[in-house]
Image (cartoon, helix red, strand yellow):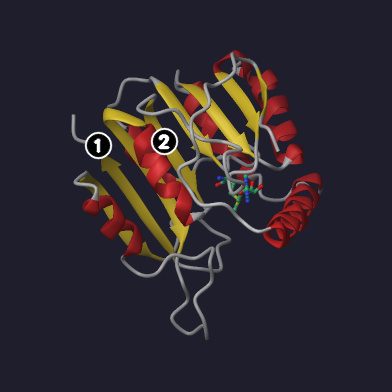
Amino acid sequence: MRPKMAGGSALSRQAPRYPPRMADARDADEGRRARWNERYGRGEEVHAFRPSPPLEDAVRGVAPGLALDVACGAGRHALWLADAGWRVVAVDFAQAGLALLRAEAERRGTAARIQVVEADLEAVGAYVPEHARYDLVCDFYFLHRPLLGALGDAVRPGGRLAFAIHLEDPAAAAPHRFLLAPGELERIVRGWGWDVLHAREGPSGEGGHQHATAELVARKPA
Ligand SMILES: C[S@@+](CC[C@H](N)C(=O)[O-])C[C@H]1O[C@@H](n2cnc3c(N)ncnc32)[C@H](O)[C@@H]1O
């Protein structure tokens, strides 16, 4: 599907950089989208609009600029960044989460700083972030490996990435496609030649997580 945007001009479109997916995978995504909408509809996953700690570390001492928040959910990171003076493009496929984000941004008076984009980040070509546009790209608790390179590409030279993504459970029988292998994220980003400013794997720094988390903050060479 095409991304739906509000509060800003349309983003330019580029050739997809990740591989096509099968129709049954799209059906599965629609089921997952419906489940996320139900969760947000019940008021879950809002986290009292408080950001995950690695985000605060990632931007400490950094002048506010333009940020991309992928899989933004109800918008706790986009809202926090906008409060701190950042402009934010916030992307998710769950309309109910985006509605919570819009309402909270209106309440705080920061809606003009947040561009909300409804898009399926796993559908080929549905959302491709612009090359070197962002001072900060955030991905909290969403893993779609084919998108990782595009997220790095979207950071401007000298800009930063902030990630917190769940890790495989060593006791689980098989790896799960939404979970990182130990060390995987740091290996990928170091492979790009970026400076890793913070990397930690272990229990999440916030409550309510079943899986361990890989946190990573990295800077693209200027
Ligand atoms: C665990 S929540 C994290 C939300 C937010 N980043 C946070 O930390 O509060 C995962 C988010 O990924 C979104 N999501 C899952 N698959 C997606 C997809 N294919 N395209 C866009 N968003 C997706 C869900 O709607 C949900 O908001």
In this rendering, is residue 48 above or below 102? below
Which amino acid, mark 2? Val
**Element type at mark 2:** strand
Disc 1 crowd, CA 10 A, few/some/many (<14, 14-19, 20+): many
In this rendering, is residue 141 above or below 211? above
Residue underneath mark 2: 137
Which amino acid, mark 1? Lys
Quarter of the image for residue 110 reads: top right
The label on residue 7 is: none
Q: Position of residue 116 (x, y in %)?
A: 63, 26
| Cα–Cα span, label 2 and label 1 | 11 Å
The label on residue 220 is: 1
Q: Position of residue 117 (x, y in %)?
A: 63, 29
Residue depicted at x 77% and y 57%: 31
**Element type at mark 1:** loop
Quarter of the image for the C terminus: give it. top left
Disc 2 crowd, CA 10 A, few/some/many (<14, 14-19, 20+): many
Nearest to N terminus: mark 2 or mark 1: 2
In this rendering, is residue 204 above or below 10? below
- Is there CB contact under 8 Å for labels 2 and 1? no
Quarter of the image for the N terminus: give it. top right
27 or 55: nearer the eye?
A: 27
Residue depicted at x 59% and y 13%: 9
118 or 106: nearer the eye?
A: 118
